[in-house]
Amino acid sequence: MSAMNRERFQSSLSRSRKIAVLTGAGVSAESGIPTFRGAGGLWRRHDATRLATPEAWQRDPGLVWEFYHHRRERALGCRPNPAHHALARLEARWRDAGGAFTLITQNIDGLHEQAGSRSVVRLHGSLWQVRCLSCGAVTENRDVPITPAFAGSGSPDPDAHARRFTAAELPHCGCGGVQRPHVVWFGEALQASDLAAAADAIDGCDLLLVVGTSAVVYPAAGFVPMARRHGALIAEINVEPSAVTSLCDFVFTGGAGEILPSLLDVAPAHG
Ligand SMILES: [Zn+2]
């Protein structure tokens, strides 16, 4: 990245009153969260993208919960990295100065919140929430294991002994209904309220930061053109060029944890 590019970006950032940020798996990966995409996308012998589906749940909810138990256990040992912290500090400075700041994330691990981000739209739900299939109640749940029956299960080892979980061993709501992970699975629609909140954040923003995501999947894929249409500046921070690179005013190539702390160390010009 050229020094001039960096100065121009920081000057634009400083003058921005409404900032939107879109983050994806790349930010989590730097904290050690497995992405289950591409190489390394297997859990046991299962293609992870086919386990996170309504069809897999219909077939074997215990297996799906075992996969999520594993993901929760892994996430429990991961900490926010410098990228999470830099974004949380930026939000705090903008909030203090009366500016607007919204972080839209495709990540479900809760690391942005753990770092102190407050205005977070979780497009794909949360590893730490469950949803009742009977009454629809969404509740926080940080139990690891999710129920005692899952203790010691979830090993990603392809030779792990697989056991079938009974319906009674799954997590249950107070109403008696079975609970599933409150995450958006492949083939499912996003929550309308999350989509609306994301669109609000993008609409009229002065600056959109795209961090650690190739932004090729709907709806994230639509955010960059949406911001572009109303004249927002767009900056991308990614380890490699992506589908949206050509639409960006600023492109910084590298790990977000290395780039963001100094790049975002800017005070708002207003307030
Ligand atoms: Zn219920």
Image (cartoon, rainbow, N blue to C red):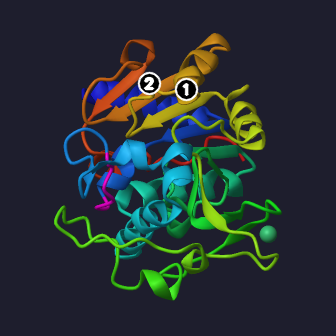
Q: Residue 182 location, x and y as percent?
A: 62, 58
SS category of the residue bearing label 2? loop
- Any part of residue 106 in sight: no
Q: Residue 180 location, x and y as percent?
A: 61, 62
- Any part of residue 31 in sight: yes
Left or right, 240 with respect to 193, comes to left
Which is more toward the observer, 248 or 57?
Answer: 57
Left or right, 110 with respect to 177, comes to left
Q: Is residue 236 above or below residue 261?
A: above
Which is more toward the observer, 139 or 180?
Answer: 180
What span is in magenta?
A: 31-36
Res 203 quadrant in image: top right
Assess disc 1: are there few (<14), some (14-19) or many (≥20) residues with their C-alpha within 10 Å of its C-alpha. Answer: few
Which is more toward the observer, 244 or 46?
Answer: 46
Left or right, 62 with respect to 137, comes to left
Q: Residue 210 location, x and y as percent?
A: 46, 34
Res 70 quadrant in image: bottom left
- Residue found 41% across the figure and 75% down from its top: 76
Q: Is residue 152 above or below residue 68?
A: below
Res 195 quadrant in image: top right
Disc sitting over residue 228 in the figure: none
Magenta span includes 33: yes
Tag 2: amino acid: Val
Assess disc 2: are there few (<14), some (14-19) or many (≥20) residues with their C-alpha within 10 Å of its C-alpha. Answer: few
Q: Residue furthest left?
A: 159
- Residue found 39% across the figure and 68% down from its top: 75
**Mark 2 sits on what residue?**
216
Disc sitting over residue 218 in the figure: 1
